[in-house]
Image (spheres, rainbow, N blue to C red):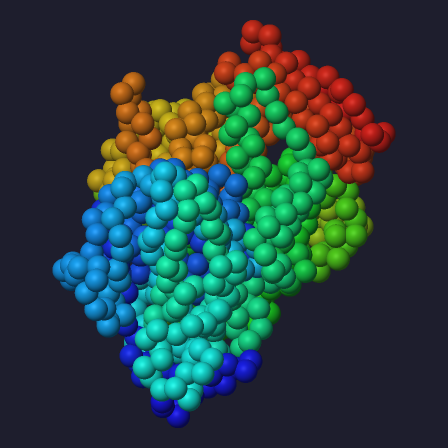
């Protein structure tokens, strides 16, 4: 055995390329495979519908499958086989969010032994190769296999195997594991010239026995590891429980099972993720799957008791709300001592500036504590230095934080990366909105200096042109730094890419709203100098914006101004974000609202990101023709603010109709922009995140649009202005709604075109004013 070893926690690891690893054959299925996704805090798992991760499929398909933590894939193969065959799927679900369940059975099997190439031997023929196994005939649907996989700080799996025949049976069950420990950015397609070294743990006795013992070892655990270019050692430690494998061959655990009629046996494992011999996940893992499920269910129940309970009189509507509540819970992720909403699974399960802020704002009616934690954590990371590699400047709010090997080795600038133009004004808007809901003076005071630094960054950035613009400085940063951040989306009416420093229309609206709202807070703090200055700057910005961004020929607002100050004159959804923020004059706002509902923009499910009349339009394009639920919920809020209630309800109904046709009734990150007809369903975007934070948040933002709550916790008041339920529901209740220190139960009931509201219960002295 080689002497090139690494000792870790009493275990010996050797380079994987120095071991004679026998290949346990993969079972290829039809491609591409549908997937199941489960998440718990900073862990997520993506499998096929059998619960498998078929590592033999290569890089060309199902690349997102695996077990991930801290931007690293700790499991790249997890394949269950029965007598060397893939089981037959009966049913599977990931409905719980943190767990998936699979029911499957065996196909029909003849006697003999299957070789890697598919040849057969007779059962009594001598078998001396670890890739060969013998089995007796099995009729189809004889063996029942129930897989349950649970995430809670580790991955737990239990497999219950049942014999449903009238006679004893004998067969082989195997689980093949592998871990490539690749960075999530590699999974997403980023090239990487160099990588670290894969390691494999030796089982007890192998150090002395030599390499032959690796081919058929008796062991209770399996260790897969990797030493990164930064020296960090990451390990997937698999500990088998219940019935231990009869032997391990390479990275495959094999059980030779004999079951009497209607007998059941259970086997399983726990997979721990370790970095430098410490748990990688921020969640303390229990020991057993039962404990993991109990801990998850208890935490979920405790959270549900603290947040607003929202229900209607229609079961289908309630199922959408319940799923959105569960997804908010699942997307909560720990960063330091607090939890914020990660942006989405699988690609963006991390802290995002823009996404986390907008999602926190969307769900303020559900759970305002997420807004507080989001503000606090982002303030902790607020920019301090001038750093072109990370696009960092003092006072700036981050775009994205990553923790994988590529970030640690400075191959990408996400430590964190600050290449976003809108997160900073959005942070200021959330700061003011959170205070309006809670009157949390402690948080207001604690973050006041961060708010001033954020405004100073905005002012410095606006000093040249008067508008907040972006331009990439980092060589590995984003070319476009608004919410539409793909490389092909900032186009003019001819479909040509805009160049130079880009000033997006919605970003100017965010700056306007931030200055208006912060001026009110400054006045409360007796900083009249700041209050007056920010108020005057907001008025001047509004005047210039209505002049410079307005396209008279189109009677619409430009997407942006380019580096030369010329309008980027395509018709897009971006101006819809301006409607609710007051930067457009009333007549211009109504013109934008009307244009967004034209057939080239509104496809029946929602408003497209780009007009279908544009040369750059592509219904399958990420930002050039697709439909985004969060984009539309912000537009709906804007329509409501203009008094266009019927139009806002029509838009919200389209989004709910779309959601009702999605797996698990979960709104996707985006979907394709094809026109809605009586005969078609919403067309799936191939790699949309699901669950995704601001898509989930759009459900609550649309509910907020309907009931139209205007909190003023500082003055101990809640205004409910002209609530309006859609025709699809008759009543809606909000229980445990928190405004300041008061808890409220509100009930809304529709009669014809009128929606009434009553205060069913109040715990506190809040004044509730209902305005028709």
Quadrant where the image shows the N terminus: bottom left
Residue 472, x across and y down, in percent: 40, 63
Decide which of 457, 182 is in the foreground and name it.
182
Viewer-nearest residue: 720 or 736: 736
Is residue 110 toward the left or the right of residue 412 in the image? left
Q: Residue at x 46, y 86 (%)?
A: 6
Can the viewer see residue 114 in this picture?
Answer: no
Give coordinates of residue 72: x percent, y percent. Answer: 44, 65
Q: What is the residue that sits farthest to the right in this orientation? A: 765
Tell me what residue is drawn at x 73 percent, y 25 percent: 745
For the C terminus, the quadrant is top right
744, above or below 523, in the image: above
Residue 30 in sight here: yes
Q: Residue furthest bottom?
A: 3
Looking at the image, which is closer to me, 284 or 341? Answer: 284
Mark count: 0
State the image coordinates of residue 221 (x, y, percent, origin top left).
48, 69
484 or 109, which is in the foreground? 109
The picture quadrant where one finds residue 282 is: bottom right
Please say if 325 is above or below 404. above
Residue furthest to the top in view is 752
**Residue at (55%, 46%) from the top-left corner?**
330
Q: Position of residue 285 (x, y in %)?
A: 60, 60
Left or right, residue 530 beside residue 297: right
Quadrant hosting residue 396: bottom right
- The residue under the point 56% across, 9% down is 753
| Left-right relation of 89 to 445 | left
């Amino acid at each position: 055995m080689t002497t090139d070893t690494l000792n870790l926690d009493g275990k010996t690891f050797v380079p994987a390329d120095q071991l004679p690893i026998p290949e346990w054959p993969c079972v290829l299925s039809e491609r591409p495979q549908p997937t199941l996704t489960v998440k718990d805090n900073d862990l997520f798992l993506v499998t096929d519908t059998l619960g498998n991760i078929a590592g033999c499929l290569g890089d060309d398909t199902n690349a997102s499958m695996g077990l991930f933590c801290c931007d690293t894939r700790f499991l790249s193969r997890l394949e269950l086989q029965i007598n060397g065959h893939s089981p037959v799927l009966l049913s599977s679900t990931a409905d719980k969010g943190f767990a998936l369940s699979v029911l499957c059975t065996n196909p029909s099997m003849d006697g003999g032994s299957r070789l890697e190439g598919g040849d057969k031997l007779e059962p009594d023929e001598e078998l001396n190769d670890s890739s060969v196994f013998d089995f007796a005939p099995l009729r189809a649907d004889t063996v029942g296999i129930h897989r349950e996989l649970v995430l809670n700080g580790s991955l737990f799996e239990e497999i219950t195997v049942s014999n449903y025949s009238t006679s004893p049976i004998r067969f082989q069950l195997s689980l093949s594991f592998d871990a490539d420990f690749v960075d999530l950015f590699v999974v997403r397609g980023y090239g990487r010239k160099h990588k670290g070294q894969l390691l494999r743990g030796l089982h007890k006795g192998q150090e002395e026995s030599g390499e032959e013992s690796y081919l058929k070892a008796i062991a209770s655990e399996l260790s897969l590891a990797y030493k990164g270019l930064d020296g960090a050692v990451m390990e997937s430690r698999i500990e088998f429980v219940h019935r231990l494998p009869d032997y391990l061959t390479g990275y495959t655990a094999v059980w030779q099972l004999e079951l009497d009629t209607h007998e059941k046996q259970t086997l399983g494992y726990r997979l721990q993720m370790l970095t430098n011999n410490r748990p990688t996940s921020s969640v303390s893992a229990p020991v057993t799957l039962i404990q993991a499920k109990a801990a998850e269910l208890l935490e979920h129940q405790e959270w549900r008791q603290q947040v607003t309970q929202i229900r209607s009189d229609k079961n289908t509507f309630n199922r959408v709300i319940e799923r959105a509540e569960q997804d908010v819970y699942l997307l909560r992720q720990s960063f330091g001592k607090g939890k914020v909403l990660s942006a989405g699974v699988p690609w963006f399960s991390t802290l995002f500036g823009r996404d986390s802020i907008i999602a926190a704002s969307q769900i303020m009616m559900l759970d305002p504590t997420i807004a507080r934690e989001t503000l606090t954590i982002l303030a902790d990371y607020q920019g301090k230095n001038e750093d072109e590699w990370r696009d960092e400047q003092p006072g700036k709010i981050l775009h994205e934080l990553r923790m994988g090997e590529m970030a640690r080795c400075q191959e990408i600038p996400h430590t964190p990366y600050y290449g976003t133009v809108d997160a900073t004004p959005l942070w200021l808007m959330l700061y003011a909105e959170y205070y309006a809901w809670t009157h949390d003076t402690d948080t207001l005071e604690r973050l006041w200096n961060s708010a001033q630094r954020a405004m100073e960054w905005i002012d410095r950035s606006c000093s040249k042109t008067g508008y907040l613009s972006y331009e990439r400085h980092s060589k590995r940063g984003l070319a476009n730094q608004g919410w539409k951040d793909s490389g092909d989306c900032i186009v003019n009416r001819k479909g040509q890419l805009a160049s130079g420093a880009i000033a997006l229309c919605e970003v100017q609206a965010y700056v306007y709203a931030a200055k208006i709202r912060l001026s009110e807070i400054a006045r409360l703090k007796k900083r009249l100098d700041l209050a007056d200055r920010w108020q005057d700057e907001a008025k001047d910005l509004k005047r210039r914006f209505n002049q410079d961004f307005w396209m008279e020929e189109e009677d619409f607002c430009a997407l942006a101004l380019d580096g030369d100050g010329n309008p980027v004159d395509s018709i897009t959804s971006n101006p819809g974000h301006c409607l609710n923020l007051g930067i457009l004059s009333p007549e211009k706002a109504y013109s934008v609202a009307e244009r967004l509902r034209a057939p080239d923009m509104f496809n029946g499910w929602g408003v497209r990101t780009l007009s279908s009349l544009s040369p750059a339009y592509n219904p399958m394009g990420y930002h050039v023709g697709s439909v985004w639920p969060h984009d539309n919920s912000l537009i709906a809020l804007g329509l409501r603010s203009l008094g266009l209630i019927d139009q806002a309800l029509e838009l919200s109904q389209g989004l709910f109709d779309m959601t009702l046709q999605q797996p698990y009734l979960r709104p996707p990150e985006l979907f394709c922009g094809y026109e809605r007809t009586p005969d078609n369903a919403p067309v799936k975007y191939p790699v949309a995140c699901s669950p995704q934070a601001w898509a989930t948040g759009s459900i609550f933002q649309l509910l907020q649009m309907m009931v139209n709550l205007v909190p003023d916790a500082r003055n101990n008041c809640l205004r409910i202005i002209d609530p309006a339920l859609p025709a699809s529901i008759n009543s809606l209740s909000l229980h445990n709604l928190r405004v300041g220190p008061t808890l409220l139960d509100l009930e809304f009931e529709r009669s014809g075109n009128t929606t009434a509201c009553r205060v069913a219960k109040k715990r506190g002295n809040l004044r509730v004013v209902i305005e028709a």
